[in-house]
Amino acid sequence: MYQMNLQEVPVTITKRTVLSFISKLYDPLGLLQPIIIKAKMMIQKSWLLKIDWDQNLPRQEIENFQRYVAELHQLKDLKIPRCILLKDYVAVQLIGFADASAQAYGTCLYAFIIIKGHAPLFKALFKKP
């Protein structure tokens, strides 16, 4: 069972503390990447604004980061089962998708599992922005 552990928001919000916070978001399978990509885009924006490492972010960016962290706490109860194959499966198909925009790209891989006597299941295997 995959579960995300979140830390508290840093008191002083600089490019360094935001990057430190973001680097602690551990998601080896990429299942939360659609959420984590927003944080990576915040760091990218701080680079474009040419903000020094220990300089406070502009007020709007601080508010965006605080809102993002508040929304992250909604994930604390999220649990993702990691078991893929179940007993009595009849067939398994792998289905992949990809998409891109000017800001990010993403891919995902699903398993479509047909189980004897049950409705088919979709299981997310991998996602990556």
Image (cartoon, rainbow, N blue to C red):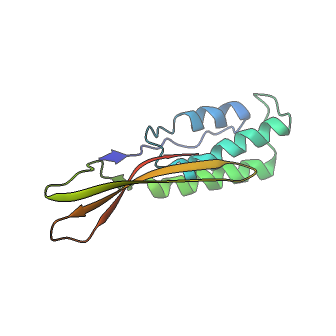
Q: Nearer the viewer, residue 16 or 44?
A: 44
Residue plotted at (69% across, 30% down): 16
Residue 17 vertical position relative to residue 41 in the rendered view, above or below: above
Residue plotted at (29% across, 55% down): 92
Figure disc tally: 0
Task: Please provide percent x and percent y for residue 62.
Answer: 73, 48
Residue 111 vertical position relative to residue 47 in the rendered view, above or below: below
Residue plotted at (34% across, 52% down): 80
Task: Please provide percent x and percent y for residue 1.
Answer: 29, 47
Q: Nearer the viewer, residue 39 or 11?
A: 39
Residue 88 vertical position relative to residue 43 in the rendered view, above or below: below
Task: Please provide percent x and percent y for residue 103.
Answer: 73, 49
Left or right of residue 107, residue 104 in this image: right
Quadrant in the rendering for residue 4: top left
Quadrant in the rendering for residue 115: bottom left
Left or right of residue 117, residue 58 in this image: right
Task: Please provide percent x and percent y for residue 49.
Answer: 85, 39
The outermost residue toward the top is: 53
Residue plotted at (56% across, 33% down): 23
Q: Quadrant of the C terminus?
A: top right
Left or right of residue 5, residue 86 in this image: left
